[in-house]
Amino acid sequence: RPWRVGAAARPDVALPCATQNELDADDARALLDAGVKVVCEGANMPTTPDAVHALQAAGVVFGPAKAANAGGVAVSGLEMAQNSARLQWSRDDVDERLQTIMADIYAACADTAKQYGKDGDLVFGANAAGFVRVATAMLAQGHV
């Protein structure tokens, strides 16, 4: 198991990016023992709920997939915008737009978590920010 690197490795960051549930509670404990400071998901739910709780309880910064892994979807949206407007953006233009989108996602997660008394809990912030965004849209459209 790649997450059981041992304390000698002293990883600062772990990036589970392969499959769902690849990082479990035992793996989280091994990473904690090794001194990990940040875990950021790069796949769809690669960290089990028990592992997420263990990491958060230990004060590890945890970037949930729905926020941290949004870059691919964002770039697809930018590509569709370019195509529909028959525009061609440079690599630097796309990267600048992506940087702004990802910074906005982080701010929404962090600010929402803080607003609801869960400062630093990016999982809660991502879930609550998404819920508020959908609820606001439903209210604006008269669906609620």
Image (cartoon, grey):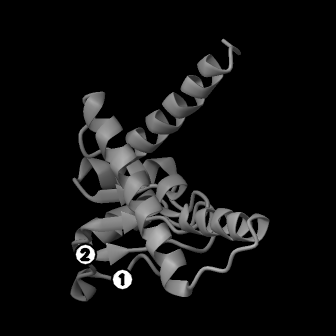
**Looking at the picture, how far across and down is residue 105, in whole percent?**
43, 53
Q: Which mark is residue 22?
A: none
**Looking at the picture, how far across and down is residue 97, in whole percent?**
48, 68
Residue occupying image coordinates x 47% and y 81%: 2
Q: Is residue 126 visible?
A: yes
Amino acid type of the residue that numbered disc 2 sits on in the rendered structure: Ala
Residue occupying image coordinates x 34% and y 36%: 112
Sequence-earlier tag: 1 or 2: 1
Indicate the secondary structure of the residue bearing disc 2.
Answer: helix
CB-based contact (under 8 Å), mark 1 and mark 2: yes
**Looking at the picture, how far across and down is residue 33, in whole percent?**
24, 69
Q: Along the line of sight, which residue is nearer the eye, 97 or 109?
A: 97
Q: Along the line of sight, which residue is nearer the eye, 36 or 76?
A: 76
Residue occupying image coordinates x 60% and y 27%: 137
> What whole-number distance in Å separates the C-alpha atoms at marks 1 and 2?
7 Å
Direction from residue 80 to residue 18 in the image, left or right: left
Q: Residues within 10 Å of mark 2 (few under 14, many from 20)?
A: some
Residue where numbered disc 2 is placed: 34
Residue where numbered disc 1 is placed: 5
Location of residue 61 with respect to 87 vertically, above or below: above
Indicate the secondary structure of the residue bearing disc 1.
Answer: loop
Q: Along the line of sight, which residue is nearer the eye, 7 or 90?
A: 90
